[in-house]
Image (tube, rainbow, N blue to C red):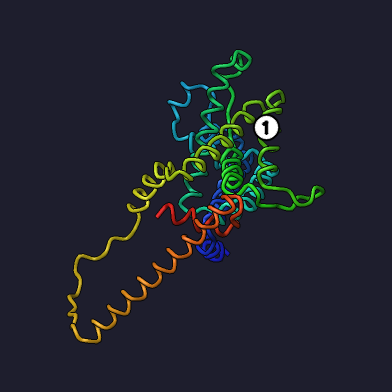
Amino acid sequence: MFKNLIGRFKASNIVGKYIYFNVAVFIFVVLTAVFSLLFNAPGASDSLVRCLELPASPRLILEQPWSLLTYMFLHADLWHILWNMIALHVFGKIFLDFFSTRHFVGFYILGGLFGALFYVLSFNLFPYFAPFAGYSFLLGASASVLAIVVASAVRSPGYRINLFLFGSVKLSTFALVTVLISFLMISGNNAGGSFAHLGGAFAGWLLAHLLGRGIDLTNFVNKPVDWVSALFKKRPSRTKKKGKFKYSASNAGDKRASDYAYNAGKKASEAEIDKILEKIKKGGYASLSDEEKKRLFDASNK
């Protein structure tokens, strides 16, 4: 069973991997709570959660800076993680239609960090939250998920999704209503969480807007991630067998064929972009299909 889960994890895309990781953290915390109860040590479970969730107090954040990242993979209960993972699955799939795997990692992490920033600032700037700042904590992937939702809406506002009871709705409309609800919920019991949602939504809008202009802020996340990943990769053996490459007319022919195929593909791609640009001149950017917009976006980032 465990090998099967590992196999599924490796075979899944980046959205699936993040869902697996969130669920794994949730199960670990729940099992810790169960064993803590059985051995009459409830404090162990509470300490674990307190160590991973994000404090509203800057002083406490300095004591556990890792919580800026860990909080976005931690959930309070079954319903909390269920709704967040359903949303991540649905909108993560849409996100990958317009962005890359590396962008997903960057948007998820930066969305969570912006959510943390909005949360901490709200508790330390507004007098209403002052009495609660010392013992308030944030947890959950909601800010990261909202960053994914809003970014997808910015990239393709006309994309339609089917909602239960509401039918077909534009993604931009859904994102706008979700952000508006988060703003209105500031007056509710989870005001700090609502500020975090707004932070995640702002991150999604900002990162997608800048990415459309060729500025990729997700590199600030992906470069450190790449560096850490490289530490765990197996290094090639220093003792390598030296092979001989024999040059022949056949090799030269293969190279010429490869160059020809590359140049032909490049010309075809340029011709396709020219057609898209010509279409923009005649009917404007709005006249493009989602596929044409994606092709133009991908070409602008090469």
Q: Position of residue 74 (x, y in %)?
A: 57, 40
Quadrant of res 181: top right
The residue that appears at 28% across and 78% down in the rendered structure is: 256
Compared across the picture, whether 268 is left or right of 158 comes to left
In the rendered image of this protein, does residue 252 appear above or below residue 240?
below
Q: Residue furthest bottom?
A: 249
Q: Nearer the viewer, residue 99 or 34?
A: 99
Name the residue tied to disc 1.
Answer: 182
Q: Position of residue 211 (x, y in %)?
A: 47, 44
In the rendered image of this protein, does residue 276 appear above or below residue 145?
below
Q: Position of residue 147 (x, y in %)?
A: 57, 41
Q: Quadrant of the N terminus?
A: bottom right
Quadrant of res 242: bottom left
Compared across the picture, whether 214 is left or right of 131 comes to left
Quadrant of res 220: top left
Callout 1: few (<14), some (14-19), or many (20+) C-alpha neighbours within 10 Å?
A: many
Q: Under tag 1, what secondary structure? A: helix
Q: Position of residue 210 (x, y in %)?
A: 47, 40
In the rendered image of this protein, does residue 16 appear above or below residue 248?
above
Q: Quadrant of the C terminus?
A: bottom left
Residue 96 visible in this rendered orientation of the protein: no
Residue type highlighted by circle 1:
Ser
Q: Nearer the viewer, residue 1 or 223?
A: 223
